[in-house]
Image: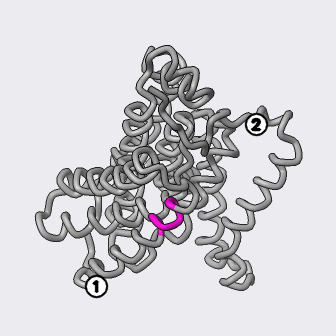
């Protein structure tokens, strides 16, 4: 039983960064914006969190710094795409490259430094931040389905012209969604560098931002399904890490490919059977909003 609960705890820890990042991107896409810069926001959150922890010794300040850093990156994306009307796909890719470059530069001063052991709760040997990720799934699901703000966000994502015609501030709604998404991605990145692997390594997000983007599609833009998908990919990561420890003679390179192969397989499956999976993207997703006075 101890081994079982240890595996469950490890599964939740592996899934937590994906839950934060994917939930944030889900809200962004529900508003009609496609932000491919999740990887860049996560890695900026990772270095901001670790650097703040090393310099101040405070986990609270470290997570706040990561949230602010992720939100600032998302705000930059919002200014470029929602105000200056740049292409969302190109800008998102540029944001990822920018985040990887800045984090590499800043991280040179923190290479080899660790954040220390993060305190765990006695329940399942997980930490309070992992528990918070589960709470956020419920909060986001409730907010999107049961509040006026969630209704407005979904209306903007489905038809931004109609939402504008009835008086909703489309750009303001999308900017707020982007800031939330950036904050969540920063939180996910900080969890990586402060809790899951408490040290800095260049490009330590290792594609998790792209997996988070795939999770949003896998979840059919539904928060509870995000948790299911994150646990699935977290389980694959656990298998990757522990397979050789159980005596399985499998190439390390092949094992490291497993999460990404699974991502491709899942996307192919749900695209072929979109009706079965209830796959329906917001109608205005990725479209530029041109305000007409």
The figure's colour scheme reads: one colour
Relative horizontal placement of residue 103, taking residue 14 as reference (left or right)? left
**14 within the magenta span:** no
Q: CA distance from mark 1 to mark 2?
A: 42 Å
Quadrant housing residue 227: top right
- Residue 118: x %, y % from top left: 29, 59
Indicate which disc, 1 or 2, sits on the residue closer to the N terminus: 1
Q: Quadrant of the C terminus?
A: top left
Tell which residue pokes out farthest to the left in this image: 56
Looking at the image, is 217 positioned above or below residue 141? below
Q: Main secondary structure of the magenta part?
A: helix
Q: Is residue 252 visible?
A: yes
Which residue corresponds to the image point at 22% horizontal and 69% vertical from the top-left? 51
Which residue corresponds to the image point at 57% horizontal and 31% vertical from the top-left? 157
Which residue corresponds to the image point at 87% horizontal and 42% vertical from the top-left? 273
Describe the element under mark 1 as helix, strand or loop. Answer: helix
- Residue 138: x %, y % from top left: 48, 28
Quadrant housing residue 89: bottom right
Which residue corresponds to the image point at 31% horizontal and 69% vertical from the top-left? 47
Mark number displayed over residue 108? 1
Out of 153 and 291, give the one closest to the viewer.
291
Describe the element under mark 2 as helix, strand or loop. Answer: loop
- Residue 194: x %, y % from top left: 32, 63
Range drawn in magenta:
91-96
Residue underneath mark 2: 279
How packed is label 1: few (under 14 Cα within 10 Å), some, or many (20 or more)? few
Q: Is residue 10 visible?
A: no
Tell which residue pokes out farthest to the front in this image: 293
Relative horizontal placement of residue 254, taking residue 106 as reference (left or right)? right
């Amino acid at each position: 039983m101890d081994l079982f609960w240890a595996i469950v705890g490890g599964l939740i820890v592996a899934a937590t960064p994906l839950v934060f990042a994917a939930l944030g991107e889900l809200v962004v896409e529900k508003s009609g914006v496609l932000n491919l810069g999740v990887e860049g926001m996560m890695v900026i959150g990772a270095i901001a969190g670790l650097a703040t922890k090393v310099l101040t010794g405070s986990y609270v300040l470290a997570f706040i710094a990561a949230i602010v850093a992720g939100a600032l990156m998302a705000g930059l994306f919002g200014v470029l795409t929602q105000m200056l009307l740049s292409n969302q796909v190109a800008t998102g890719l540029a944001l990822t490259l920018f985040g990887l470059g800045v984090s590499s530069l800043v991280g040179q001063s923190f290479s080899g430094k660790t954040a220390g052991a993060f305190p765990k709760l006695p329940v399942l040997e997980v930490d309070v931040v992992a528990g918070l990720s589960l709470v956020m799934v419920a909060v986001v699901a409730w907010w999107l389905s049961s509040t006026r703000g969630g209704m407005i966000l979904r209306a903007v994502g489905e038809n931004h012209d109609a939402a504008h015609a009835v008086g909703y501030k489309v750009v303001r709604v999308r900017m707020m969604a982007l800031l939330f998404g950036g904050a969540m991605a920063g939180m996910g990145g900080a969890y990586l560098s402060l809790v899951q692997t408490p040290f800095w390594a260049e490009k330590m997000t290792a594609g998790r931002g792209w997996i988070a983007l795939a999770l949003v599609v896998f979840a059919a833009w539904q928060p509870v399904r995000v948790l299911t998908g994150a646990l699935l990919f977290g389980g694959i990561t656990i298998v990757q890490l522990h397979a050789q420890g159980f005596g399985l003679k499998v190439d390390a390179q092949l094992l490291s490919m497993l999460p990404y192969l699974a991502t491709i397989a899942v996307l192919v499956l749900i695209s072929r059977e979109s009706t079965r999976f209830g796959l329906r993207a917001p109608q205005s997703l990725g479209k530029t909003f041109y305000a007409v006075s």
